[in-house]
């Protein structure tokens, strides 16, 4: 005699659904937190020092585009169970996959170097460590984390570090005592300038918020977590929270720097270490410590995510095994490439003076924005493929938003070229 199945009450059904949604959270949050890496913090800090509250509108605009681009990437992962480079190889061939992968890796190399530069700046501020010691410790810690952990442990650690970064910069903004009214006004009313420096800052701010590696990471991480079409609602919530937190943290950094250095006329600082020291005289030593701790945590998060994304892309493009749940002998190319990216960037930081690294950190964000449209074209075309996407195919509304976002990034890139080389 069979035991009758227990009927769940409506409340119990809702609890089960809520638990299922919570289980999906992770890829969007990690991707969002990782967007605020060392390069991002440096870019937001310099933007706040040089232009005060004026670039806050860029963060609001980029948040909207970030949500839709990340949502499309997550949906591609849910529908296919594959990463972006693997899908491009399957639909368009190895040559196009290699082109997209190469485009992404060009931007990623600068970003990885920026993470090591951020570690060096933070550890130098707090402990006085030289560049070589900071790079050595950071490389060892990240390699051990990514090669000895599994998906769950890595994800939980990434989210914990992201929360640490958020808290540090939220408190920094409060200690700076900003003009919240002026900040709110700048958030919704753009203040445009015609000089090249302003538009370089706009492009860099967009480039550090919406990145080529972030677009690939969200899709590969969703596939690595083995989520499916039934997880769409939870993953959209995940992506929405990630996009919101990304830009909130960025806004806190801009506001803290605008309320202190910019408001007192100290607008000559060009790197985050100098900015952090300047905050000590204006908002107290605790603000400097918080800024350094946030930078260190963000740099470690970026060092975990960007090399991981680079290894995902390279292996997917050629059909090799990928994923942090694989063992070394099962995915030697994946782990070998990941370590190569980390070690080569660490050596670069040891050799190049810190002043040169500052320029690399800012330039990497501009390159991100210039190369992102190439990646988004592949994403938008794949998301419109009914045979590939099934019920998760992009509809007219999502395609319109996606192509408008891609077009906007192209316009920004052309604007940067015009203002830089034609003197507009």
Image (spheres, rainbow, N blue to C red):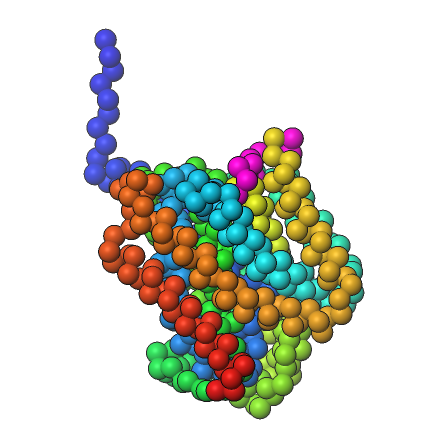
Q: Is residue 263 magenta?
A: no
Q: Is residue 325 magenta?
A: yes
96 vs 270, left or right, is left
384 vs 84, left or right, is left
225 vs 343, left or right, is left
Residue 130 lies, in percent from the top left, at 78, 65
Residue 119 lies, in percent from the top left, at 67, 62
When asked about the image quadrant of residue 284, the answer is bottom right
Residue at image coords 62%, 58%: 109
322 vs 219, left or right, is right
When asked about the image quadrant of residue 406, the answer is bottom left
Q: Please provide the residue range marked out in magenta.
A: 317-329
Residue 73 can be seen in this image: yes
Furthest residue toward bottom? 265
Q: Nearer the viewer, residue 11 or 298?
A: 298
Total marks shown come to: 0
Residue 174 lies, in percent from the top left, at 50, 75
Residue at image coords 54%, 55%: 104
In what quadrant of the picture does the N terminus appear? top left
Magenta stretch: dominant SS?
Answer: loop
Residue 349 lies, in percent from the top left, at 73, 62
Residue 309 can be seen in this image: no
Q: Nearer the viewer, residue 272 or 283?
A: 272
When asked about the image quadrant of residue 145, the answer is top right
Q: Taking 2 as reference, is 43 above or below it? A: below
Q: Nearer the viewer, residue 57 or 179?
A: 57
Residue at image coords 71%, 51%: 343
Q: Taking 283 as reference, is 14 above or below it? A: above
Residue at image coords 50%, 66%: 370
Furthest residue toward top? 1
């Amino acid at each position: 005699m069979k035991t009758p199945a227990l009927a769940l009450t409506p409340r119990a059904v809702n609890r089960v659904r809520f638990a299922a949604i919570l289980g999906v959270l992770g890829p969007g949050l990690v991707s969002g937190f990782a967007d605020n890496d060392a390069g991002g913090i440096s870019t937001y800090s310099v933007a706040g020092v040089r232009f005060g509250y004026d670039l806050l509108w860029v963060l609001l605009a980029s948040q909207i585009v970030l949500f839709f681009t990340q949502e499309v990437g997550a949906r591609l992962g849910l529908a296919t169970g594959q990463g972006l480079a693997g899908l491009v190889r399957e639909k368009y061939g190895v040559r196009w996959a290699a082109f997209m992968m190469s485009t992404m890796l060009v931007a990623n190399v600068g970003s990885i170097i920026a993470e090591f530069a951020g570690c060096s700046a933070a550890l130098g501020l707090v402990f006085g460590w030289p560049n070589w010691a900071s790079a050595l410790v950071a490389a060892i810690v990240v390699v051990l984390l990514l090669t000895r952990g599994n998906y769950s442990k890595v994800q939980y650690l990434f989210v914990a570090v992201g929360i640490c970064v958020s808290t540090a910069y939220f408190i920094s903004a409060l200690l700076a005592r900003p003009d919240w009214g002026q900040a709110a006004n700048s958030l919704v009313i753009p203040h445009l300038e015609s000089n090249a420096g302003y538009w370089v800052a706009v492009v860099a701010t967009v480039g550090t918020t919406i990145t080529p590696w972030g677009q690939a990471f969200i899709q590969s991480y969703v596939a690595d977590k083995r989520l499916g079409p039934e997880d769409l609602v939870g993953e959209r919530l995940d992506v929405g929270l990630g996009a919101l937190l990304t830009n909130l943290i960025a806004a806190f950094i801009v506001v803290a720097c605008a309320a202190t250095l910019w408001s007192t006329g100290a607008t000559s600082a060009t790197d985050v270490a100098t900015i952090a020291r300047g905050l000590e005289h204006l908002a107290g030593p605790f603000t400097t410590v918080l800024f350094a701790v946030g930078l260190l945590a963000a740099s470690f998060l970026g060092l975990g995510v960007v090399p991981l994304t680079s290894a995902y892309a390279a292996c997917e493009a050629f059909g090799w095994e990928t994923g942090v749940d694989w063992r070394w002998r099962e995915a030697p190319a994946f782990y070998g490439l990941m370590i190569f990216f980390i070690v080569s960037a660490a050596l670069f930081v040891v050799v190049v003076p810190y002043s040169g690294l500052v320029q690399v950190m800012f330039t990497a964000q501009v390159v991100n924005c210039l190369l992102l449209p190439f990646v988004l074209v592949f994403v938008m075309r794949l998301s419109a493929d009914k045979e590939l996407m099934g019920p998760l195919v992009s509809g007219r509304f999502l395609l319109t938003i996606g192509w408008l976002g891609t077009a906007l990034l192209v316009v920004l890139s052309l604007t940067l070229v015009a203002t830089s080389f034609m003197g507009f």
